[in-house]
Amino acid sequence: MLNFFTEIFSFPFMVRALVVGVLVSVCAALLGVSLVLKRYSMIGDGLSHVGFGALAIASAVNAAPLAVAIPVVVVAAFLLLRISENGKIKGDAAIALISTSAMAIGVVVVSQASGTNTDINNYLFGSILSLKDGDVVLSAALSAVVLTLFALFYNQLFAVTFDESFARATGLRAGAYNALLALLTALTIVLGMRMMGALLISSLVIFPSLTAMRLCKRFLTVTIGAGVIAVSCFFTGLTVSFAAETPTGATVVLVNGALFLVFSLISLLKRRLGKTSEHFHKPSV
Amino acid sequence: MVICRNASFAYDGGAVVSSLNFTVESGDYLCIVGENGSGKSTLVKGILGLMSPFGGEVELCGLSLCEIGYLPQQTAAQKDFPAGVFEVVLSGRLGGRGLKPLFSRADKAEAEGNMRRLGIEHLKRRCYRELSGGQQQLVLLARALCATRKLLLLDEPAAGLDPVITQEMYAHIEKVNRETGITVIMVSHDIRSAVKYARHILHLKNTQMFFGETPDYVRSAVGAAFLGASGDAEHGEG
């Protein structure tokens, strides 16, 4: 067993994948708790599609991919947030409009520029094993920013997530914290796209927090639980994909899905058992 | 403490409620009554500063926005929210404390004190979504108390509660008003409890139908009609 792990991580590309993957997974999971509870899950999905369009354009004009993608996705994040908050068009429909348009632009640009679809494949499904040292440094720096801001404003983010109108009424600048959430999500999505691909990155945002919510009951435990779940799932997915020679991003998503099912089952059983034992031991309150 | 001078509020240019002229004194207990869609919740948003008046003005005297305790109507998402009771109550302390990342001992003591005042300190370690509707409302009231020493704004605090719990809720609010001198402004369509507890009544029907002391309201034509109508409705339902 130990031999297996030392063998896997003797490859530098695996170590890079592990470092970047763990950092991005944790960021995505923490932000995911707020996004899922605020019913903003689709924003993450929409942003990844916008990111795809931006990366395609960047590669077509030979610009640095992240230098183009980060500002574009950040702008899109504020736009999607604004639409979700006070849209005339229903929020989810508007997000679908924007994300599919961005996707279509990306596909057209890539097909015109290169004539092949290998790049498309990398952008759509990720290429975690081809990360460079520069990607590791950038991921570490951006994750540090995301994690620090999240920790500093944890209480405010909880208040804005739990009850935005109360937060506003008591003088909290809810708009600013929503914008912070959108900014951090945009950074995380762009980072994660390189490894998971545009189609799969939003799973890292959504799965860990939903899985944690099956069993954890407090915001703090859900948040920590989501982080732990994200890291374990990523690690498991990475090693399994290496051993079974399956695509890494998709394997990580499948591990997340499996864990979600297991946690749902446990929570269902607990509720069943809890109900019968309450029935026998406790008078109803 | 709150003064409305000919204030009106509108969504997208269409006035929802207009010609509001009333004053709420410190320590007062005001009930805002009226049918659904009469502009009650809109007025609450106006007092909270979440909406600016379309015309006229709303003045808060000796009161900044982070000194109002607010009990909003619950949203569907909240009922299923994974949060600890103490996490929720403590979040009421955030408004006035700037950007400090951690809660102080004083914040925690304040939160515990307010839970004790409402008799829910035993719920401190519980999970919010597993509480009954009445317990959830008390938790939110404790949170609102954490945010203020001066003014409580309550939007239908008894919505969806059974009659016994509803009376308990009103008794708690009355006690807070009496013992701490915190001004209470409450939106309610439970007119009978409103005239039982409130010192002043503001009756809205997209404009101000009545503002004055409760006994005068009961004797007024508007009040008598509304009390009679809701009485009939209760008999009809029963």
Image: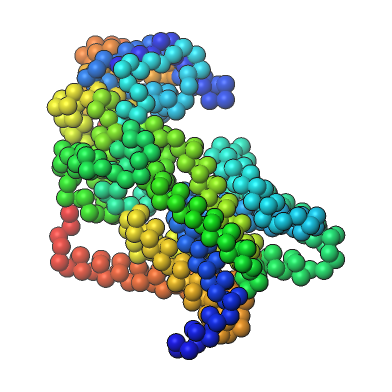
Residue in front for this viewpoint, A78 or B136: A78
Would residue B70 be visible to someone looking at this image? no
**Vertical arrangement, residue A202 with respect to residue A182, above or below:** below
- Which residue is rendered at x = 18% and y = 57% of the image? A284
Residue A271: x, y in percent?
30, 66
Residue B183: x, y in percent?
25, 23
Quarter of the picture containing the N terminus of chain A is: bottom left
Quarter of the picture containing the C terminus of chain A is: bottom left
Residue B234: x, y in percent?
28, 32
**Vertical arrangement, residue A9 with respect to residue A284, above or below:** below
Q: Which quarter of the figure has residue B40? A: top left
- Which residue is rendered at x = 56% and y = 85% of the image? A243
Q: Is residue A145 left or right of residue B82?
A: right
- Which residue is rendered at x = 44% and y = 28% of the image? B50
**Vertical arrangement, residue A15 with respect to residue B187, above or below:** below
Would residue B185 be visible to someone looking at this image? yes
Q: Is residue A228 left or right of residue B193?
A: right
- Which residue is rendered at x = 63% and y = 44% of the image? A75
Q: Is residue B192 left or right of residue B209?
A: left
Residue in front for this viewpoint, A82 or B228: A82
Residue in front for this viewpoint, B37 or B148: B148
Q: How is the image coloured?
A: rainbow
Residue in front for this viewpoint, A54 or B16: A54
Residue A38: x, y in percent?
47, 48
Tag count: 0
